[in-house]
Image (tube, rainbow, N blue to C red):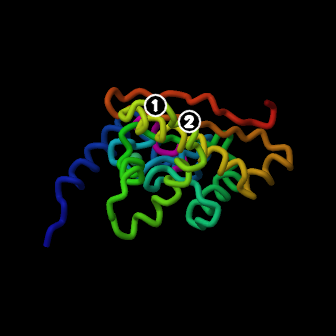
């Protein structure tokens, strides 16, 4: 039986190191969670939410899927958003895409990827909605552009969900942000698409 022993060893070291600095860290955190942020990002292993923004457990509520897509009929994503907004009362929703996204790249090709092509249709839609923006763009820049446009589209999508609309109608100060992460240097960029009821 393979028990992935090394991962349990790493876990023990990690928990011990935290407890050495803050003996009550886990005890206190076990009583409640009160994150200010909902992170919707890509499943890519190189884009781990908490580590990128250097926040400990308890600070970020996270939903990840291939190419950080918000689909109006995706009950998984919508349930996360509802719980984050209505129960945890997060103050910010961050849609974080990344350059070099394999999902975006796959969506740009006509190759057969099997089941996932159904999911990637959402990215192909983003490309189609923004057709004009690709005119005159160098081939190698089109990939980066679609990664950015996808974030902006998902910002629009999340703003249009019943959950976010209801929150704003009831006076919530909830903000929605569109960010992109560079896997080549570890740096985040704000795409300046922040939407909040005070704008
Ligand atoms: Co990705």
| Picture layout, residue 184 above or below residue 146 | above
Judge the density around disc 1: few (<14), some (14-19), many (≥20) Cα neighbours within 10 Å.
few
Identity of the residue drawn at 39% across and 42% down:
47
Q: Is residue 195 left or right of residue 31?
A: right
Judge the density around disc 2: few (<14), some (14-19), many (≥20) Cα neighbours within 10 Å.
some
Percent x, y of residue 34: 62, 46
Percent x, y of residue 96: 51, 41
Q: Which residues are magenta?
A: 51-63
Query: Which label is found at residue 133?
Result: 2
| Residue 32 visible here | yes
Q: Nearer the viewer, residue 155 or 130?
A: 130
State yes or no: Cβ of the residue under disc 1 lies below 8 Å from any atom of ligand 1.
Answer: no
Q: Are marks 1 and 2 in contact (CB under 8 Å)?
A: yes
**Label 1 sits on residue:** 137
| Picture layout, residue 121 above or below residue 39 | below
Q: Nearer the viewer, residue 98 or 48?
A: 98
Identity of the residue drawn at 33% across and 64% down:
113
């Amino acid at each position: 039986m393979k028990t992935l022993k090394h991962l349990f060893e790493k876990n023990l070291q990690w928990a011990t190191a935290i407890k050495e600095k803050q003996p009550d860290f886990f005890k206190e955190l076990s009583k409640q969670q009160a994150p200010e942020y909902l992170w919707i990002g890509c499943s890519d292993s190189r884009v781990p939410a908490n580590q990128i923004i250097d926040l400990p457990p308890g600070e970020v509520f996270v939903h990840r899927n291939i190419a950080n897509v918000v689909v109006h009929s995706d009950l998984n994503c919508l349930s996360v958003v509802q719980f984050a907004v209505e129960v945890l009362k997060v103050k910010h929703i961050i849609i974080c895409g990344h350059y070099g996204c394999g999902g975006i790249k796959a969506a740009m090709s006509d190759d057969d990827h099997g089941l996932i092509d159904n999911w990637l249709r959402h990215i192909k839609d983003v490309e189609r909605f923004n057709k004009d923006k690709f005119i005159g763009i160098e081939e190698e820049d089109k990939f980066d552009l679609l990664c950015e446009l996808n974030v902006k589209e998902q910002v629009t999508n999340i703003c249009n969900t019943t959950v976010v609309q209801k929150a704003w109608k009831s006076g919530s100060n909830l903000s929605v942000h569109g960010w992109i992460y560079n896997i080549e240097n570890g740096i985040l960029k704000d795409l300046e698409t922040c939407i909040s009821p005070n704008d």
